[in-house]
Amino acid sequence: MGRSNDLAIVKASNGLEAQEVLKENSDIKIILSDYSMPKANGGQLYKFNTSETNLPFILMTAGSLDDYEEFNTFYKDNKLNAFLEKPADDEEIFQCINNVLDKQVSSESNERPSKKADKKSEYKKVKPQFLMRFAQQEFNLYLEIGDGKFVQVATATNKDMKSVIKHYEPKKVDYFFLEKDDYNIFLQKTKDLLESPVKEEQQNIQEVTFAALDLAFTVAQEQLDALKVSKMHQEFVNRSMERVLTSIKENNDLFKILKNYLTQDDYLVEHSILNIYFTSYLLNKLNWSNDQTVKQMMYACFYHDLEIRDQRLGKIRSLSELTDANEIEIVKVHSKKAAERMEALKGINHDAYKIILDHHELPDGSGFPQGLQSSNTPPMSCVFILSHDIVDFLIENNFQTQYLASKFQEMEATWNQGNYKRIFSCAREILLD
Ligand SMILES: [Fe+2]
Ligand SMILES: [Fe+2]
């Protein structure tokens, strides 16, 4: 009868006693309950469970689930809940328990599901190996159990994070989740390692850099959804990035700039990664993608703002937004400076150079530094400029896509022309249809 044989059973003779047992034993994994019980019935015990512990609940009773109002949302409340019709023999009971255990990796955890609102945006995913390698402190750790629901599997105060991660190793968990604030601490500490003067860390600098890059690439799903980036395209980006990273690993100058890039402010890192996804998506849709084109575009996405450290300056669209002469100068020359720095490097071709140089040009000629018109802007530059504009718009609007339709309406007059025309329609098609 499998592993049910190994389970310890705690019995309670009525519904109230069961509640006491649950309060006292935080390591209970499953509740098996009848409906008709003295003092508190199965419905009352179930209510107690959903508000306090939300453990998988197996209801074993005669009749059907529909007979009991308290169980209206039974399968929604916890996907592991199960119903067993009486009479059931031992074999059936153990089979049912085994099913619940097998179905959910998190049911083996001693921790209770989080009482926080289960919202995806409140958690950030991290690969287990990064937590093992880089976490310098304990965090609350979560697993996603589907449908945007999370279960807490380790608690910072218990200091058990790494042992929990080890425990899940055989289950091949792709990602654990941290609370957003903890994630930011974790990310910052990993970035600090990149700037760390400590010698032994310097030796691992490649490893740390690529781990930090991987971390930066764990883009939140809602951001990719807002850009309509499909799973298939995510895989395309992963494959293309592998080629780009192989080249960066072999090229010390590109590597140094990448390391530098990863220590920039959050917006600067985030917006370039989202541009990697969206520019390559546009290139695919436009049938302009070959390995070399995509690779040069990716270089441009990473490196276009490499002369900017402060995200406030990275967000400037027009020089008139600035008053400080120093800042105006930094922004005015940053595209040219970056393009020239990149031009000198092996592996960078004229496309990437031009994209970086042109990245603040605008279709109506009001951009800088050259004031290019839409008919004089190379199509690859147009792809980048348009993608950059849309990504910024979404970042500003917290990835709420309902404003995109009016955004495209506003853009129509200036963007639907010259070398931008085809790219503009393609972006509209992707994002609005
Ligand atoms: Fe820029
Ligand atoms: Fe930028």
Image (cartoon, grey):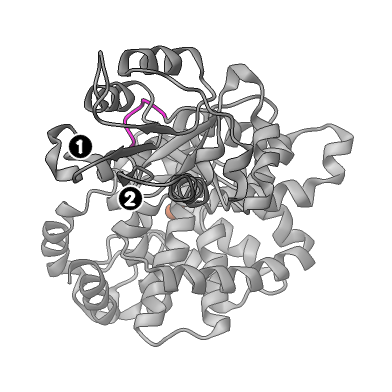
| Residue 16 image offset from top left, x and y in percent | 32, 13
Q: Which residue is mark 1?
A: 71
Q: Is residue 131 visible?
A: yes
Residue at position x 12%, y 68% in the image? 413
Relative horizontal placement of residue 381, taking residue 209 as reference (left or right)? left
Residue at position x 60%, y 33% in the image? 186
Label annotation for residue 325: none
Q: Disc 2 or 1, which lies upstream in sequence?
A: 1
> 114 above or below 206?
above
Residue 320 lies in quadrant: top left
Q: Secondary structure at mark 2?
A: loop
Q: Secondary structure at mark 1?
A: helix
| Residue 29 image offset from top left, x and y in percent | 49, 32
Q: Are marks 2 and 1 in contact (CB under 8 Å)?
A: no
Q: Which residue is mark 2?
A: 317
The residue under label 2 is which amino acid type?
Arg
Q: Is residue 347 magenta?
A: no
Residue at position x 57%, y 53% in the image? 174
| Residue 105 image offset from top left, x and y in percent | 53, 46
Q: Is residue 116 magenta?
A: yes
> 134 above or below 137?
below
> Considering depth in this image, is 181 or 275 the residue closer to the camera?
181
Count the marks: 2
Real-space Cα separation, disc 2 to disc 1, in angstroms: 55 Å
Range covered by the magenta-colored residues: 114-118
> Considering depth in this image, is 32 or 266 the residue closer to the camera?
32
Q: Is residue 318 visible?
A: no
Residue 431 lies in quadrant: bottom left
